[in-house]
C-alpha cells in the first residue's frame, strides 16, 4: 500500500456541509496532524477514512485501491477515538484482542500477540482488569494497543489527548511520539491543539469549516501560512493580528496604525503592497516585554526594533510559562514569556519585536502577502 | 444545642409515624387479600369484619387447584406473559437499534408517532377486527394468539424506551468494534445488548406489569381454561352461587408471587427503566 488519498470529498448532513471538496494525500509511513477548531470537520474526515461514514461525493483511496464503499471491517485501518471507545463489558485482554478475535486466530497466537503489545506499551500487568478500573492514561494505552494489534496499514487518532489533564497530556505526548517513531505506521492525528502538531507531526493539515486551508510540513505552515486564520491558529498562543494600512513616507513604504509605525524592510514585500488595509501578524513568542521603560539600544542583538506601548490587562500562567495580555490602543496583545511572570494590572509596559518576523495578510481576503524579511 | 436535639427527636418520631401510616395504607389490601384467602366463607362475610381470623385453612387454594383447573390457568398466565415479554423484546430491541442508529425520512415525526399511537388506541376499539382476524388465522383460544396480542401491546413501549437506552451507548463503541473487523451484527450482540442489559431487565419487568392483569383481550380471544389466564378465571368466580371471595383472593395471592419475585430480582433496573422512558 502506498499511502492514502482523499479526492474531492464532500460530506453533508442535511443542510450542513461537514466537508467541502476536500483533497488530501498522506504518504506511506508519515505522521499527519489534522489541526482545526471544534466543528471544523476533523472527526468526519477521519470517519470517512475509516469507512464508518460514507462521503456524499468524492473518493477515498488506499494505495491505488478505491475503498470509498468498503465497510470499516474490511479496511486495513484502525482508529483510536476521543473517549477511547473501550468496551466496558470486557476485560483489558479482550479489548486488546478484539481485532485478533475478529480474524479467528488460534487462541495461542492471540495470547502471544496481546502479551507482546501490552508489554510494548507497559500495560501487561493490567490485562485481567476491567476498563472501569483503569486511569485515563492506562485507558489510552489500551486503546492504542488495540489499534496496533490489528496490524493495520493506517492508524487514525481522534483527539486522544483532549480528555487528559494538563500534566498527563504533556507526559503522554512525549511517550506517544517515541512510540510512533518506533512503530512507523501511516498515521493521521486530529487535534484542536497546535502544541500537539508542533510536537508530533511531519506535516500538518489545517482545517476550517470543512475545508483544508493548508497542507504542508509544519515548518512551512508555521513560517508561511496561507491565510490569517492558519497563521493565527497554528501557534500557541494564537498570533496577534493588528489592523494597519500602507503609507508612503520619506524613507519609503511604512505600515501604520493608531499604535504603530514600522518601515517595510523586505524588497519582496514592497513590490506586492498596494495602498490598502492589511492585517499585521506578530506571534506572541516574537514579542519581548519591557517593564522598566522603553528599550534603548539593541534587543536580542538586533538594533532595529518596533516598539509598542501599552498597559498590562492580566497575566495568565500556563504550566511553567506566562501569557501576558497587554492593552495597546483598542487592541489586546498577547505576549509569551518563559517562566512565571507576575506584574500588576495596569502597569505601563513596552513591547518590542523584530520587524523581519512579522506576517502580513490582506485585510479583506485574509490571504498571506509576505513576511517582514 | 438542647433545642436541636429535641427537634431532631420530634422529627424522627414524626417521620416514623408518617412512614408507618403509609406502609399500613399500602400493605393493608395485601394483608386483607392473604387473610381472606386463608379464611372460611363465614369469616369473610362477617360484619363487623374480624381483622385477625381465629383459624386458618388452605381450602381455597385446594379448590383452585383441584376443582377449577387453577394450575393450568396459572401456568398459562406465566407462560403467556413471559413469552410475550420476550417476544416484544426480541422484536423491539432491533427496531429500537434501527431508530437510534440509522437516519431515515420521517424518523422522529412520522415513524415514532405511528409506533406510539398504537398504544394510545384503547384495545377495545380494535377488538372486533382483531377477533375476526384471529378466527381466520385459527388463533382464538390459543396461547400463541394471546402471546402475539400481548407482544403487540408491549412492542411500542419497548421500542420507545430501549431507543433511549441505546442512544446512551456511544456510537464510537460500535464503530470501534466494526473497525476491529467485526460486523455490525456482531457489534449489536457483543456490545449493544450487553450494555443494554439494565434496560432489557427493566423492560422485561414493565412488559409483565402491563399484561399480567390484562382482561379484555384475554376474555375475547380465549374461550376455555386451556388458554385462559388468571383475570378470566377470577371473573368466573362471580356466579349464581355468589362471589367466591376466598378463591378470588387465593388467585390474587398466587398471581402476586411471580411478579413479586421478578421485582425482587430486577428492582434496581426498574427506576432506571422508568426514568429513561419518561424523561426522554
Image: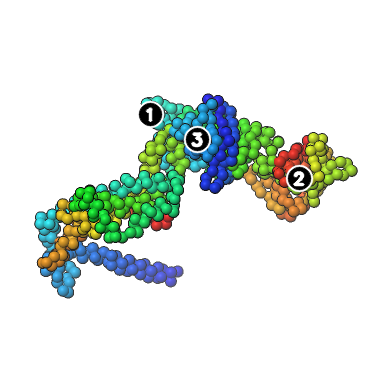
Q: Nearer the viewer, residue A362 or B137?
A: B137
Is mark 3 in CB contact (under 8 Å) with mark 2? no
Q: Nearer the viewer, residue A354 or A364?
A: A364
Mark 2, residue position? A278
Assess disc 2: are there few (<14), some (14-19) or many (≥20) residues with their C-alpha within 10 Å of its C-alpha. many
Residue A145 seen? no
Provide residue A67's location: percent of width, then percent of height: 50, 31
Local SS, label 3: helix
User: Vertical placement of A14 versus B177: above or below?
Assistant: below
Q: Quadrant of residue A35?
A: top right
User: Vertical placement of A322 versus A50: above or below?
Assistant: below
Q: Earlier in the sequence, mark 3 or mark 1?
A: 3
Q: Residue at x 24, y 65 (%)?
A: B29
Q: CA distance from mark 1 to mark 2?
A: 62 Å
Q: Quadrant of residue A225?
A: top right
Provide residue A159's location: percent of width, then percent of height: 55, 40
- Front position among marks 3 and 1: 3
Q: CA distance from mark 3 to mark 1?
A: 22 Å
User: Vertical placement of B196 versus B24: above or below?
Assistant: above
Local SS, label 1: loop
Q: Residue at x 37, y 28 (%)?
A: A107
State which quarter of the image contains the C terminus of chain A: top right
Question: For the residues tagged 3 and 1, is the chain the same?
Answer: yes
What chain letter is assigned to the residue under label 1? A
What chain letter is assigned to the residue under label 3? A
User: Which mark is on residue A104?
Assistant: 1
Q: Residue furthest bottom?
A: B48
User: Which mark is on residue A50?
Assistant: 3
User: Which mark is on residue A311?
Assistant: none
Is mark 1 in CB contact (under 8 Å) with mark 2? no
* Number of marks drawn: 3
Amino acid at each position: 500500500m502506498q499511502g492514502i488519498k482523499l479526492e474531492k470529498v464532500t460530506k453533508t448532513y442535511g443542510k450542513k456541509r461537514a466537508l467541502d471538496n476536500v483533497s488530501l494525500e498522506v504518504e506511506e509511513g508519515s505522521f499527519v496532524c489534522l489541526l482545526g477548531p471544534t466543528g471544523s470537520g476533523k472527526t468526519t474526515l477521519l470517519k470517512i477514512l475509516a469507512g464508518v461514514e460514507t462521503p456524499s461525493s468524492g473518493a477515498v483511496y488506499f494505495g491505488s485501491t478505491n475503498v470509498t464503499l468498503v465497510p470499516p471491517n474490511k479496511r486495513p485501518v484502525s482508529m483510536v477515538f476521543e473517549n477511547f471507545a473501550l468496551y466496558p463489558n470486557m476485560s483489558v485482554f479482550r479489548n486488546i484482542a478484539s481485532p485478533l478475535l475478529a480474524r479467528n486466530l488460534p487462541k495461542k497466537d492471540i495470547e502471544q500477540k496481546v502479551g507482546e503489545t501490552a508489554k510494548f506499551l507497559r500495560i501487561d500487568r493490567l490485562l485481567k482488569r476491567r476498563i472501569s478500573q483503569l486511569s485515563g492514561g492506562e485507558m489510552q494505552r489500551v486503546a492504542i494497543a488495540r489499534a496496533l494489534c490489528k496490524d493495520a496499514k493506517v492508524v487514525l487518532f481522534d483527539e486522544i489527548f483532549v480528555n487528559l489533564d494538563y500534566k498527563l497530556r504533556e507526559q503522554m505526548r512525549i511517550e506517544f511520539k517515541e512510540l510512533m517513531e518506533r512503530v512507523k505506521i501511516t498515521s493521521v492525528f486530529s487535534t484542536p491543539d497546535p502544541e500537539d502538531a508542533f510536537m508530533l507531526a511531519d506535516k500538518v493539515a489545517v482545517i476550517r469549516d470543512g475545508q483544508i486551508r493548508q497542507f504542508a510540513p509544519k515548518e512551512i505552515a508555521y513560517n508561511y501560512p496561507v491565510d490569517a486564520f492558519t497563521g493565527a491558529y497554528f501557534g500557541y498562543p494564537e498570533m496577534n493580528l493588528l489592523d494597519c494600512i500602507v503609507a508612503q513616507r520619506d524613507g519609503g513604504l511604512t505600515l501604520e496604525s493608531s499604535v504603530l509605525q514600522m518601515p517595510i524592510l523586505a524588497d519582496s514585500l514592497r513590490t506586492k503592497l498596494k495602498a490598502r488595509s492589511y492585517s499585521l501578524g506578530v506571534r506572541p513568542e516574537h514579542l519581548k516585554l519591557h517593564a522598566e521603560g522603553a528599550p534603548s539600544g539593541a534587543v536580542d542583538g538586533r538594533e532595529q526594533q518596533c516598539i509598542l506601548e501599552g498597559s498590562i490587562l492580566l497575566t495568565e500562567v500556563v504550566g511553567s510559562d506566562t501569557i501576558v495580555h497587554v492593552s495597546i490602543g483598542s487592541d489586546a496583545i498577547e505576549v509569551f514569556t518563559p517562566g512565571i511572570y507576575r506584574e500588576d494590572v495596569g502597569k505601563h509596559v513596552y513591547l518590542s519585536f523584530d520587524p523581519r518576523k512579522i506576517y502580513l495578510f490582506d485585510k479583506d481576503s485574509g490571504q498571506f502577502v509576505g513576511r517582514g524579511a | 444545642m438542647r433545642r436541636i436535639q429535641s427537634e431532631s427527636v420530634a422529627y424522627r418520631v414524626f417521620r416514623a409515624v408518617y412512614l408507618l401510616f403509609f406502609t399500613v395504607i399500602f400493605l393493608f389490601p395485601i394483608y386483607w387479600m392473604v387473610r381472606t384467602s386463608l379464611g372460611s366463607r363465614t369469616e369473610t362475610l362477617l360484619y363487623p369484619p374480624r381483622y385477625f381470623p381465629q383459624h386458618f385453612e388452605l381450602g381455597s387454594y385446594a379448590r383452585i387447584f383441584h376443582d377449577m383447573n387453577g394450575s393450568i390457568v396459572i401456568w398459562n398466565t406465566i407462560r403467556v406473559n413471559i413469552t410475550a415479554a420476550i417476544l416484544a423484546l426480541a422484536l423491539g430491541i432491533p427496531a429500537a437499534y434501527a431508530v437510534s442508529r440509522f437516519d431515515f425520512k420521517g424518523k422522529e415525526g412520522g415513524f415514532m408517532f405511528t409506533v406510539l399511537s398504537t398504544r394510545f388506541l384503547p384495545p377495545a376499539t380494535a377488538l372486533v377486527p382483531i377477533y375476526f382476524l384471529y378466527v381466520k388465522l385459527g388463533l382464538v383460544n390459543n396461547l400463541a394468539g394471546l402471546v402475539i396480542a400481548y407482544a403487540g401491546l408491549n412492542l411500542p413501549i419497548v421500542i420507545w424506551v430501549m431507543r433511549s437506552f441505546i442512544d446512551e451507548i456511544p456510537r464510537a463503541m460500535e464503530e470501534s468494534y466494526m473497525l476491529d473487523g467485526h460486523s455490525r451484527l456482531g457489534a449489536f450482540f457483543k456490545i449493544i445488548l450487553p450494555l443494554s442489559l439494565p434496560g432489557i431487565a427493566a423492560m422485561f419487568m414493565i412488559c409483565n406489569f402491563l399484561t399480567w392483569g390484562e382482561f379484555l383481550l384475554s376474555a375475547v380471544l380465549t374461550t376455555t381454561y386451556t388458554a385462559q389466564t388468571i383475570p378470566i378465571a377470577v371473573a368466573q368466580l362471580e356466579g349464581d352461587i355468589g362471589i367466591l371471595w376466598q378463591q378470588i383472593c387465593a388467585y390474587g395471592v398466587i398471581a402476586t408471587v411471580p411478579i413479586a419475585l421478578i421485582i425482587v430480582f430486577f428492582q434496581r433496573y426498574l427506576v432506571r427503566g422508568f426514568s429513561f422512558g419518561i424523561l426522554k
